[in-house]
Image (cartoon, rainbow, N blue to C red):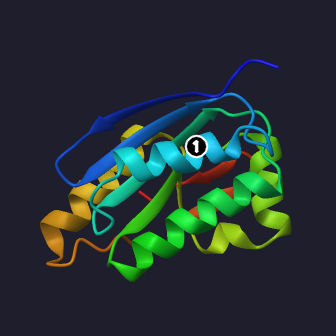
Amino acid sequence: MPALRMHTSHHADATVITVAGEIDLASAPALHRFIAETHQTPAAHLVLDLAEVPFMDSMGLRVLLEAYTAAEQHGGAVHLAAVQRAPARLLQLTRLHERFRLHASTQLALAAIATASATTPSGAVDGGALRGPRGATDPS
């Protein structure tokens, strides 16, 4: 099994982490460390681009929940972008899709963050995205 690949980019109001590969028992600790090392400001938005993640197990969910908890405690948010069918199904079965802000793409996630930052002092983003089998699409 190929190793999990991760890349980060920083934007005005968000850190984007692009993930490629399966997030499972073996790879979840590396993702957890990568998030901790690259997302230094929990109050900022964290966007996880999951377009190249075909599979995620309960350990992957745990990493997402830990990121969500840290962000929420500091007034930030976690956005999941381009969630593939199998991980989206896992999020729906566990009802965790209700906790995250879901977007069809990283570009739409960043646009939603920028719009919210421009219109609200806290930068809060409406979590009312439509959710489908591949994740979510933005209401706009």
Q: Which residue is mark 1?
A: 31
**Quarter in which the C terminus is drawn:** bottom left
| Residue name at image x 43 percent, y 78 percent | 72
Tag 1: residue type?
A: Leu
Q: In the rendered image, is residue 60 in sight? A: yes
Left or right, 24 with reference to 130? right
Left or right, 29 with reference to 54? left
Residue 37 vs residue 68, the one in the foreground = 37
Left or right, 62 with reference to 13? right
Residue 17 vs residue 129, the one in the foreground = 17
Percent x, y of residue 139: 48, 61
Percent x, y of residue 88: 75, 52
Percent x, y of residue 32: 56, 50
| Residue name at image x 59 percent, y 74 percent | 99
Residue 42 vs residue 30, the one in the foreground = 30
Left or right, 36 with reference to 53? left
Percent x, y of residue 53: 69, 34
| Residue name at image x 32 percent, y 47 percent | 15
Which quarter of the picture shows residue 46?
A: bottom left
**Quarter in which the N terminus is drawn:** top right
Crowdedness of circle 1 by 10 Å Cα count: few (<14), some, many (20+)? many
